[in-house]
Amino acid sequence: DFGLSAKGKVISFFAVVGLVAQVVLSQLDTSGWCEMRIACYSSVIIAIGQLLAASSNHIVVFLIALAFVSIGSAVLKVFMTTALSTAAGELSYGEVLGVAGSVFSVSRAAAPLISGVLAQYVGSGAPTFVASFFMMTAATALYSLQ
């Protein structure tokens, strides 16, 4: 049986794949890439990974799902920071990045609480389905900004 305790034991895989993705990404010449388009694609990749994780009953499927989420998250972090800096301009990019950092911090604090409530009252897969919905909403919003 592949339940929540087994998923908890392999969660470190998430960090390793994300780290490798960021190292590889730092070696690429991304100067000609459209940040918003890459951020949009990354959001879709994260949503696919979250849906796979929510529906996984096998360790291999769960590891593949974590790889999707890890790679998508690593790429999204890099390209959203670049896109925010570029959009803000030279005079206010520090302020914009500061606000973005605060929003990310609040979301990291609130997400476990909200996920716990969803898992308790709706079901164990609910947090990942809700997160997938939000990632697809973000992808749609980013696509419209291109």
Image: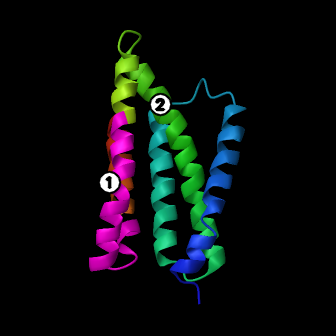
The secondary element bearing badge 1 is classed as helix
Could you tell me residue 69's position as x and y percent? 54, 57
Point out the image quarter for the N terminus. bottom right
The secondary element bearing badge 2 is classed as helix
The answer to if 73 sits in the magenta stretch is: no
- x 51%, y 79%: residue: 4
Residue that badge 1 annotates: 110
Is 29 positioned to the left or the right of 114 in the image?
A: right
Q: Residues within 10 Å of mark 1 (few under 14, many from 20)?
A: few
Q: Residues within 10 Å of mark 2 (few under 14, many from 20)?
A: some
Q: Which mark is residue 81?
A: 2
- x 33%, y 44%: residue: 106
- Counting residues from the start of the chain, the first of labels 2 and 1 encountered is 2
- x 33%, y 29%: residue: 99
The part of the image, by quadrant, that contains residue 16 is bottom right
Residue sitting at the far top: 91
The part of the image, by quadrant, that contains residue 111 is bottom left
Residue 143 in sight here: no
Residue type at mark 1: give it: Ala
Spatial CA distance of label 2 from label 1 is 21 Å
